[in-house]
Amino acid sequence: MQLKTLLLTCLLLCTSITEAQKTAHFYLDSIARLNQLELCYSEDMVNLQQTIYPSGDSLSLEDYIRHVAYESHLHIQLKGDNLIITNPNEQTILISGKLMDLSSKESLPFAHILQRDWGTGSITNAEGGFELHVPAVLSGLPFEFSCMGYADTTIIVPHQDSLNLLIALRPKPYNLNEVLVLPNGNTAEDLVRMATKRIKRNYHRKTAQMDAFYRQTGFRDSTFVQLFEAALLIEDKGIDMPTSTTKIKIREVRKSQNYYIPMDAKHKWAYEKMEKMILGGHQNVLYRAYSNPVRGYKVSWWYKPLTDYEDFKYEFEGAMWLDTVKVYKVKYEYDRLYVNGKRASELSDNFDGGYIYINASDYGILKMNRIWSFHASDKNRSLAIKDDKFADTEYSFQKIDGKYYLKYISGLNGPQGKFTIYENPDAANKDKVIKSRQWAESMLVITNIVTERQERERIRQRELLDKHENSFETNYPYNPEFWLNYSMIKQKPLPGKAIEDLEWEKSLELQFEENSTANVEN
């Protein structure tokens, strides 16, 4: 049956109903009746209350069903005499694999994965791995993989599970003129100055609400020793307002046991004192997780590469392409001038700096890294958390309707325990032998952004997260049904090794329950 006849029938039926009744259910019911089909769906699984207006006048029945399915985000199947409607989130295709450099075969961590038609996506993990649970309705549509400095590649969502894919990105070669010649004769410092000057123009100045997923995993060498995950609602007042106005509401939390080797009282006191000096108080780890150097570029803190041009030096590293955007890469390094006449970079062989990636067209900051690394010859390398690094954090931003918003933050964290465990802890410092190190890795991913005032969720004062409580020591309600259906857990599942390591004593499910308010109340 052609859609033209169906539309005429629908038009006649519409004369006796109100506009509010023009729902997806009405059109689907019309399709079923006109084709002598039985409409099958479960009201508790499928929401048919979204208004769908048919378009086109020459579609076949199959194409029309496909159109309604796409517009209403439903999975619709024609089987025999039945028109079956299901929630596509309940029918998923598993796609897993690893993203790597085509030439070097090295993994590409924190690369972007995006399905543009539906606006859904994710990022690869620290090892370049990914695992996506894609709604079955997306089968046949393209998924894009992109990483700064590489040509994009696309895969088509298969009709069934596809595991252990190896997806290679081809490096985009530098344009030699762009590597050797700064744009318009500017210095690297000039690029940073222009990017900073345009922050207010480029970044959102109105209130935005963001759904976010936070995960922190603790390690002792290669062993997982702690897991903390939270689903959050973040309200950011915009670049004109101080960072202290940011509101965070916890939707759900789950925590494992803490298997770190704890700090002794003396070192714990010193560490907490250092936190207070740097942060102006012991700030909740979830508030810290959302902070970034672009959002707080005017804050008076000890580390200001976007505003302190006396204490930092800058070097132009060349131009590259991210998607279709030309990007300037600038290296910065802490280089304060001391009273003895020497610069900070001359006093040790440590590296304290990072990289800033600037959009060449509007000077928006697309990405920023901060690295504090120790060389093997450094006497203080025992302070290093991982791979001779004490800090290694990446901030990535996305442009929506002409304004930049945070996309994700990932990096190393201090552990909830000792930094270093020694073979001979009672020996003199110069004679101590390192047995193992403890550290944490964290990730904050923005999963949704709401900019319209009428669509934002009101956050009541009693719902606000306390900025000064210790989230690792505070118990929160635990709702297993939420985590069972939470899409970010499906997109970012825990590695099998993490589950194996953390469950050496008891199951993770039992740990989540024991670290919840329900267990405390019982």
Image: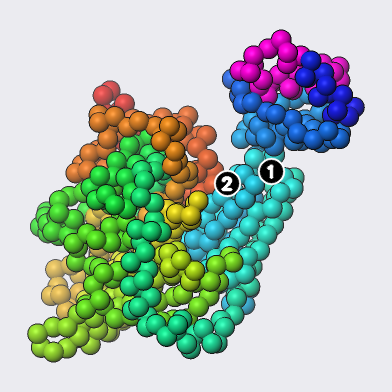
Seen in the picture, residue 241 relative to 109 is either above or below; the reply is above
Are circles 2 and 1 on residues that touch, CB within 8 Å?
Answer: yes
* First reached walking from the N terminus: tag 2 or tag 1: 2
Q: Is residue 304 above or below residue 461?
A: below
| Residue 257 image offset from top left, x and y in percent | 32, 43
Q: Is residue 458 magenta?
A: no
**Outermost residue toward the top?**
16
Specify the farthest residue to the right.
Answer: 1
Foreground residue among 176 and 97: 176
The part of the image, by quadrant, that contains residue 59 is top right
Report the Cα–Cα distance between label 2 and label 1. Answer: 10 Å
| Element under disc 1 | helix
Relative to residue 174, is residue 380 drawn left or right? left
Determine which of the numbered discs, if any, sits on residue 120 in the image. Answer: 2
Q: Observer-nearest residue: 518 or 399? A: 399
Q: Is residue 6 above or below residue 241?
A: above
Which numbered marker is on residue 138?
A: 1
Range drawn in magenta: 13-41
Q: Residue at x 67, y 20 (%)?
A: 22
In the rendered image, the vertical position of residue 120 relative to residue 392, given as above or below = above
